[in-house]
């Protein structure tokens, strides 16, 4: 059964993230992204709906942000800030995730990330498609964009046109594509030629094996 981490286990969690960063560097990666989204461990610590601790890692916003920030600093120690990013998903409610005041929580956290010299912030904020849709009045992108001083990335249902529009309008510096890349190993070329994309086979996501992983057709150059 899941259980809360004991307070004396937190340093080992930080050590594991540091070791992962070191391993990535040894393997020749260009940089790393800390996964603080989707209800994973760091997301659970940050958000009030999942963090019910009463020690130095729970309760106040400052305490809830402590472990994610300690991990961030450990990874930056390995790579330097310009080679590290952080991914957040403030609107994600799967796995019973929630926060009483996401605008306050993620604004504070973004300000603190700024102080670390983090290279980029990666925000999942769906604009449509299978990812869902976040109404304009609840979007955090404009707020966090103003706070974060370095590269700002948006993710969530973007295509060629909507991605270019977001960059042109200044909403983001970059757009991240997830599902389109799963189904289109040649996505940049398809965007370049402005041709239709393969449809993703959702039933094959995360199930193992080659089907739906290595068998999507490549574009025949035109």
Image (cartoon, grey):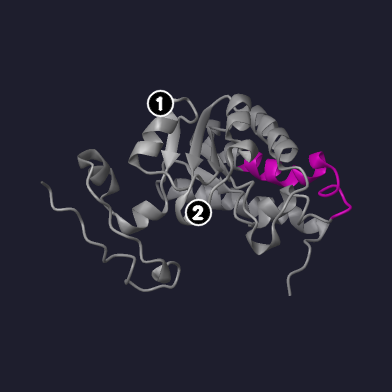
In the foreground, 141 or 21? 141
Left or right, 219 with respect to 204, comes to left
Q: Percent position (x, y) of residue 112?
A: 70, 32
- At x 58%, y 37%, the residue is 136
Specify whether residue 72 is painted magenta.
Answer: yes
Left or right, 46 with respect to 26, comes to right
Q: Quadrant of residue 201?
A: bottom left
Specify whether residue 189 is painted magenta.
Answer: no
Left or right, 61 with respect to 116, comes to right
The quarter in which the N terminus is drawn is bottom right
N-terminal-most mark, 2 or 1: 2
- At x 76%, y 58%, the residue is 9
SS class, disc 1: helix
Q: Is residue 117 visible?
A: no
Give the magenta part as a residue range.
53-74
> Can you tell which mark lies on residue 78?
none
Q: Report the residue marked by disc 1.
A: 168
Q: Report the residue marked by disc 2.
A: 131
SS class, disc 2: helix
Q: Percent position (x, y) of residue 80?
A: 54, 33
In the foreground, 2 or 138? 138
Alpha carbon separation for disc pair 2 and 1 = 22 Å
């Amino acid at each position: 059964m899941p259980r809360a981490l004991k307070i004396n286990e937190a340093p080992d969690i930080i050590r594991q993230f540091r070791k992962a960063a070191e391993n990535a560097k040894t393997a020749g990666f260009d940089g790393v992204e800390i996964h603080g989204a989707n209800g994973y461990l760091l997301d659970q610590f940050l958000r009030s709906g999942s963090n019910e601790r009463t020690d130095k890692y729970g309760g106040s916003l400052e305490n809830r942000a402590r472990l994610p920030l300690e991990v961030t600093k450990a990874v930056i120690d390995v790579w330097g800030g310009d080679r590290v990013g952080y991914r957040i998903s403030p609107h994600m409610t799967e796995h019973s995730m929630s926060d009483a005041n996401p605008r306050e929580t993620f604004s504070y956290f973004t300000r603190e990330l700024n102080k670390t010299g983090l290279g980029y912030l990666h925000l999942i904020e769906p604009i449509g498609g299978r990812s869902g849709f976040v109404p304009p009045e609840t979007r955090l992108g404009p707020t966090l964009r103003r706070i974060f001083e370095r590269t700002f990335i948006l993710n969530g249902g973007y295509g060629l046109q909507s991605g270019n529009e977001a960059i042109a309008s200044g909403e983001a510096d970059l757009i991240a594509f997830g599902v389109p890349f799963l189904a289109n190993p040649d996505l940049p070329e398809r965007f370049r030629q402005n041709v239709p994309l393969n449809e993703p086979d959702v039933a094959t996501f995360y199930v193992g094996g080659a089907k739906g992983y290595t068998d999507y057709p490549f574009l025949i150059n035109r």
